[in-house]
Amino acid sequence: MKVRFMFSHVKKVLSQCSTGVYRFGAALALLLAIPALSFDYMDISQPVLKSAANAVLAQKAWANEAAPAAAPAAEAKKEEKKGPAEWAPQPPPKLEEKDYPVVKGFNSRLTVWFIAQLHLFFGAFVLAVPIFVWLIEITGVVTKDKRYDDMAHEFMKVAMTGFSLAASFGGLLSIALVVFYPQFMTYMTGIFGKVMIFYALAFFAESFFLYTYYYGWDKMSDGNSKIVHIGLGLGLNLAGVFLMMVSNSWASFMMAPSGLDDSGVFQGNVWAAINGHLWNPINIHRFVANIAYGGSLTAAYAGYKFLMAKTPQEKAHYDWMGYTSFFIAIIGLLPLPFAGYWLTKEIYDYSQQMGITLMGGAFAWLFILQAVLIGAIFLSANYYLWCCLARSNGSHRYSFMIKPIAIVIVTMFLAWLTPHTLVMSSTELTQIGGAHHPLLGKLGVMAAKNTAVNFLIVLTFLSFQIYNRSNKKALGDGFWAQNGTSVQIGLYVAGLCNILALGIYSYYLPASVRIGLSVPQVTTTLIVIVASFIMDGKIFNKSEELGETKWGNMPVRSQYALFTLTIGFTWLMGLMGYVRSAIRQHWHVYTVFRDNSPGAFTPTLPYAAAVVTVIVCVFIALVLFMFWMPMLAAKKGSSGEH
Amino acid sequence: MEGNKGNSELGKILVYGLLIMLAFAGYAKFGIPLVIPEAPPVEEKITGAMTKDQFVAMGDKIFHGKGTCTLCHSPVGGRAPVLDAVGPRSSERIKDPRYKGKAKTGEEYIRESMMEPSTYVVAGFGKPGTNDTVSPMPQINKGAIGLSDVEINAVISYLQKSGGVEVTVPLPTGAAPAAPAGGAEAAAAPKPATTAEEAFNKYGCVTCHVVPGIAEGGDMGPNLTKLAKEAGSRKPGMSGQAYIIESISTPNAYVVKGFEPDMMPSDFAEKITMSEMNLIVNALLGKK
């Protein structure tokens, strides 16, 4: 009965669509709804479809409103012959609480929050993995080392289930938004409708490239066919990046709307709506974060497989895989704070009010929690790198550096998480003489935070560099072989002194000027990293290995450092997703379309933290399923061989 | 055996992961002070039955709440000028050679600063790189804040009052609120006057003054029937409207020649509603 009911509604909704474009969109949305409805949504199927139908009907109502109300009947007939009326832009509706559908047993806001965050977790993973898989594959072709090719293939194997999960949650999100926020979706569709069609079509492209890339891996393994295979990988990544950028434009539009007049009426230029003030900063930030996150997730997979490995060969393989994944995560992690700073700067530039709400208002304390999380990520990353020294034969030459690096990293971590304003009793306030501790309070301002984060980045790179050269010995009597390390030491000392001096100097400047000093600090960090990396190339131009790298010779705790990295990243992504969305406060579209739903309030940090924790738990359960799938296939394969 | 080992290792990893997450969530709950974000703002209910002090109090509430003014206009951070003395300072701003706006009075300057913040940017508070020609402040009547005209007036009245200058903004008009049902307080609350005549009688003006529209009146205070012509010239630089408001709120601020100070009660400002003040001012100025 319910199936028949659903199909009769599908037919009804489609027949109400005014244009082919919306008909296609509605068909796609409803198509995506059917699998979701076939599970435990049966009891709400009626409201779901009614809401979907209402949204489409509302779209049609707009189209009808565009026609002049007092048009003569003859002209109306002419219009009918010509086709449906042109869509006309409308201001966002002023909604009341009663305008938001209520589905029994569901909290609209929490449901959308859960689904959106899970979609983003899997989306980030499956957008990132093909990027580094593709690069690893090319590395394998260039170096002619088949191990790279095999590892790239294994990464793809892990990610395949992730694609299905990302798509399923994407479809569920579309339906949830239509069900719980139909007018909002109508408004957004009115602006981005055309782009949404291309977005949906890009999934076909993504699917085509994904399946040909993955299933064609063995067939297209050498010669010209390998080049075709690499081309398919490029197509997969282009489609993925396109999808990410399009969906980012909706999120950035909601934060910083563009292409509208003062009353929020869309002016007809879709590109102006897409290319808003925050679009590119969000694109860059998400792209870099996805790489770091994807790397950390595959590192966790390798860590788990390492702990499960039965033979030294397996241990060596998964150790290598874990290290490669970790390396990718660090490549993404190091520039991430800079991308974050840029995004925040652009938020301030767009709206000082929004910027201050973010950093100085209700969310200011969230960034102390963020500092703890990033600090935990940096500490676990450095700890893993120090454990990695056990693989190298010449690591004893550098082991004396670990303690000083650890001390400075922990100090900087503590500086980063020290708040400006302390929570004290009135007696303590009187004793200290204010809400700011005379010494520790100075660590609470951006001058100290910027200095701390630049130190953390430089020293994490130093840990990596130590490991990278620990198994090598420079040969020859050239300048770089003889003096390169001394030049590098000088570079590090000068760089760190400069970052510190700029940080201290900035205390003497007004707040508005002080923030500008973060630019030379970041530049110094980048110069130290890039120059030191280039120097390593020159120093070890002629070098010898001090023995074979002992892959697999890693303590168990090193793998737990990888798990910390992964959970830290995931939890942090959830937290920052909350704040990015919450700084819109009580607006669906900031300053333009007010949210008057019962969930329009801004949740407190503990509430958000609890929600994020539950979402991450659900995500981890699904990740285990994702990891289990390729193992299941492998088991079947091996049983077949026997 | 192998399966058991795998499950045991997986169990350890999951417990470890859960502990880490609980540590993060626990820190958010117990390690960080609880900040309860403000509820979504609602438009202030403005009625003609507000007294001036109530109107100023409403401006105070908007300034510290819905208007989000203190995000920047506070001593912490130095993001925008502190406004505790903007009342008296506003009259000086319009004389600044850098000032290119249209304001003629302090009140107009404050309103212009709120609605067109870049008209005059206080030195050192412009957007970086604009040489103090572009203000980072949003237009207060648009966007996320979107104050109404009356709400803006309430904020101006608060800034004027807190700055120690006369409140000159026009008073809100509108329907009086429905009388609360029942209760001693409700019964005791006087009903706001709806005509000028009612207002004159309610506050006993005719006991001492002869006022327009009422034949009978006392002579302990000046005859007010010709005030429409005289009010604008009583105090240099002060409009007739502002003069009348001041005379009602602070009677001793200007005492007409031939009359004694301290004769008129000085608590009218606390009793009179905004709509009643408007009715009286308009009647005295000969406006309908």
Image (cartoon, coloured by chain):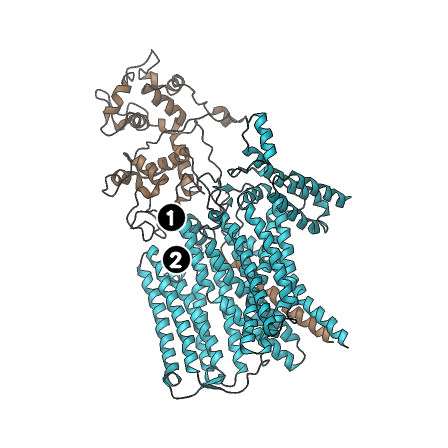
In the image, which lettered chain appears cyan? A
Task: Give B190 or B74, whichever is nearer the viewer.
Answer: B74
| Figure quadrant of the C terminus of chain A | bottom right
Mark 1 secondary-structure assignment: loop
Q: Is residue A392 left or right of residue A81?
A: left
Judge the density around disc 2: few (<14), some (14-19), many (≥20) Cα neighbours within 10 Å: some
Q: Is residue A94 left or right of residue A527?
A: right
Q: Amino acid at mark 1?
A: Cys
Q: Nearer the viewer, residue B132 or A574?
A: B132
Q: Chain of mark 1?
A: B
Front residue of this view, candidates A400 and A246: A246
Q: Which mark is nearer the camera, 2 or 1?
A: 1
In this figure, which residue is indicated by the disc labeled 2?
A436
Tag 2 subunit: A
Q: Which chain is brown?
A: B
Residue A360 seen anywhere in this rendered image of the structure: no
Find residue A258 and report its horizontal and vertical position in percent: 46, 46
Q: Is residue A585 above or below residue A304?
A: above
Q: In this view, which residue lies farthest toward the top? A: B215
**Residue A504 horizontal/vertical position (percent):** 33, 65
Q: Residue A106 bears which disc, if any?
A: none
Residue A247 visible: yes
Mark 1, residue position: B72
Seen in the picture, residue A473 relative to A496 is either above or below; the reply is below
